Amino acid sequence: MSASVHARGVRKSYGLVEVLHGIDLEVAAGEVVCLLGPSGSGKSTFLRCVNHLESINGGELEVAGELVGYRRDGDKLRELTDRETAATRSRIGMVFQHFHLFPHLTALGNIMEAPVRVLKRPKQDVRRDAMALLDRVGLADRCDAYPSQLSGGQQQRIAIARALAMSPQLMLFDEPTSALDPELVGDVLDVMRGLAKDGMTMLVVTHEIGFAREVADRVVFMDAGLVVESGPPRQVLDEPREARTKEFLAKVL
Ligand SMILES: Nc1ncnc2c1ncn2[C@@H]1O[C@H](COP(=O)(O)OP(=O)(O)OP(=O)(O)O)[C@@H](O)[C@H]1O
Ligand SMILES: [Mg+2]
């Protein structure tokens, strides 16, 4: 299977401070990779580089065989404009810790927005697909609710449906359940589990070790801007090789 995400030597600096020191990471099509690591290790920064919400300062990053945010010019990479990146980015769904729904749109409106505005698809078709997505995340009966009328877990499920409405080839999740009350976490993880089962390619930053153990094909542990180790969940979570992984797991388990 071709790699869906192919990161080689990805470096990222903010000003003079380098926070990603050369990340190598692959996610195959259909694979679920969970990214773990201490606060400040660069997990969110890396995810943001994958869909070019951040530019990179070294290395290269491809999604589904295409550079994201750059084009090759001889042996150099030239950064594309936002407009030029939009098509590639629209194939990458992203779900954040804080849901970032449009407050003035209903659940249905949130899901329909991008397919109508960006893809210019007919409203009627988009509505039909959006209703199917609402059903998939268990919220068909809340289609007319505004974000403020929904629980955090419901808002997050709408955010997932909104991302799916663009038919992404890859879904990025950045601690999607970290802001939720414990009793709301399960419904969101269930939706993610379903997606994984349906073969979606997923890169998930999470502190939910149970989810990683059960759903991930591979777990990647990052620390201080580098991948420390990666492998099948059992190996990384139960028999970590590196001291830093052991130390981290001792704290979170
Ligand atoms: N916009 C920014 N400007 C300057 N420094 C930043 C910026 N964003 C992140 N950083 C720094 O980059 C490093 C990595 O941050 P990042 O948010 O990627 O970590 P993380 O692994 O996602 O942490 P957490 O688990 O707390 O979410 C940190 O030292 C952070 O302070
Ligand atoms: Mg983060």
Image (cartoon, grey):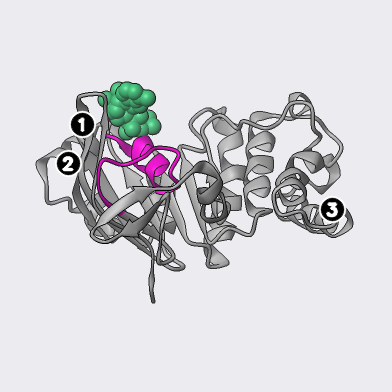
The mark found on residue 126 in the picture is none
Highlighted range, magenta: 40-60
Residue 94: x and y in percent read: 53, 45
The residue drawn where x is 70% and y is 46% is 114
Q: Quadrant of ligand 2?
A: top left
Upstream in sequence: badge 2 or badge 1: 1
Residue 90: x and y in percent read: 58, 52
Mark 1 touches mark 3? (CB < 8 Å) = no
Residue at the disc numbered 1? 18
Residue at the disc numbered 2? 246
Q: At numbered mark 3, what does the secondary structure look like: helix, strand or loop?
A: helix
Q: At numbered mark 2, what does the secondary structure look like: helix, strand or loop?
A: helix
Residue at the disc numbered 3? 127
Label 2 CB sits under 8 Å from any ligand 1 atom: no
Residue 53 colored magenta?
yes
- Quadrant in which the N terminus appears: bottom left
Identify the amino acid type marked 1.
Glu
Query: In this figure, what is the number of numbered marks?
Result: 3
Nearest to viewer (mark 2 / mark 1): 1
